[in-house]
Image (spheres, helix red, strand yellow):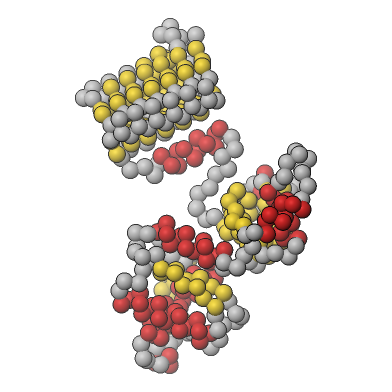
Amino acid sequence: MLKQTMRWLSAGFAAALLLAGSARAAEWFPYKAEAVNPPFAADGKASMVEYVPLAKASKKWDICVSFPHMKDAYWLGVDYGVVEEAKRQGVKMQLVEAGGYTNLNKQISQIEDCVARGANAVVMLKAVDDPSAFGIAEVDGERIVRLVEKPKHPTSNLAIVGGYVFDHNIFESTRRIKPSWRNEFEITDAIQNLIDRGLNVVPYVVHGWWKDTGKPGDILDANRVLLDMLTPAVRGKVDAESRLDGTVVIGEGAEVINSTIRGPVIIGSEARLVDAQVGPYVSLGDRVHVIDARIENSVVMDDSLLEHVPQPIAGSLIGRQVKITGSAAAAPATLRLLLGDFCETELP
């Protein structure tokens, strides 16, 4: 639905501007325009096309149209033209506006809500290279027709990413299914029941970055992606002996004393770093203390302590309220740690 809508809008803006005025179509068309493939992509390939409006839509489309705002004559004219053209072609349309160019998240949310309109369930999907490792969805047109868990011979590369929207029918489906071999009620079984009952289950394909964070390495990959999106901000205290390189975010009440931080790094509020080397690609939670220790490419959750650890720590996930202490006599081999909440580790 979204692809069809975007395609229709890309070609239809010229018609919209025409219909906002009083000129007749014969005086304007064919209209020469520049098309970008894929639509709206900043690095898309441009080509010249001639646009002529259809006399009638090929079928009774139900489309969503989203505008960034309607605060000036241009977008008001486009709005009028799109509405009139939809009426002329017998197309059902829902139109929304986000209130300004800066409200991208609102506009995306409006589009998602619009796509879900009329559906009994929406399942988020992502095209993957190894569909046999995932639960996948088989799609026919604008509907999901079957879910298959880790198929040996997949007929689709659309993996289920774990985001869903349901209406009230999901409750009846959960009552109808039985526990799986794991003795658990599976959400995929409930969705398949919706499909088997003839209800409308539609796909929403994620085109941005997505990662299945089921393993430690995957969480670290996600951490790196998010850290690369940071904007520098220092709200805590950094003394004159400390050095910040790259993108660094330091929360309120945090202290950095005689330490080196190589971004991208984010440090939570009330954290304390003394004689530390941190980064790149480190996320430290609130009230984390790193004293006489080195860490990179890692995530440390709230209220944890790393103290007097001469070995570099890298590629590690450290939970909440973890205490790691060491000895100055230890060998400098790199440590890779996977520690759950409340662990205490004393290194030799």
Image point (51%, 70%), residue name: 64
When the figure is inspected, residue 145 is found, relative to residue 87, above or below; the finding is above
Q: Is residue 71 left or right of residue 67?
A: left
Residue 214: where, in percent of width, then height?
59, 38
State which quadrant residue 72 falls in.
Answer: bottom left
Task: Tell which residue pokes out farthest to the left in this image.
Answer: 240
Count of picture labels: 0
Q: Position of residue 323 (x, y in %)?
A: 47, 18
Residue drawn at x 30%, y 77% is 73
Where, quadrant-wise, is the N terminus in this rendering?
bottom right
Is 28 situated left or right of 138 in this image? left
Kindly identify the residue that appears in the image at 54 percent across and 34 percent down.
Answer: 217
Residue sitting at x 42%, y 19%: 306
The image quarter containing residue 19 is bottom left
Q: Is residue 126 above or below residue 214?
A: below
For the residue pair 84 and 229, the one nearer the viewer reads as: 84
Look at the image and tell me whether residue 154 can be seen.
no
107, 264: nearer the viewer: 107
Q: Position of residue 137 (x, y in %)?
A: 67, 55
Task: Report whether residue 97 is seen.
Answer: yes
Q: Position of residue 148 (x, y in %)?
A: 72, 51
Q: Is residue 62 above or below residue 269?
A: below
Q: Is residue 256 left or right of residue 186?
A: left
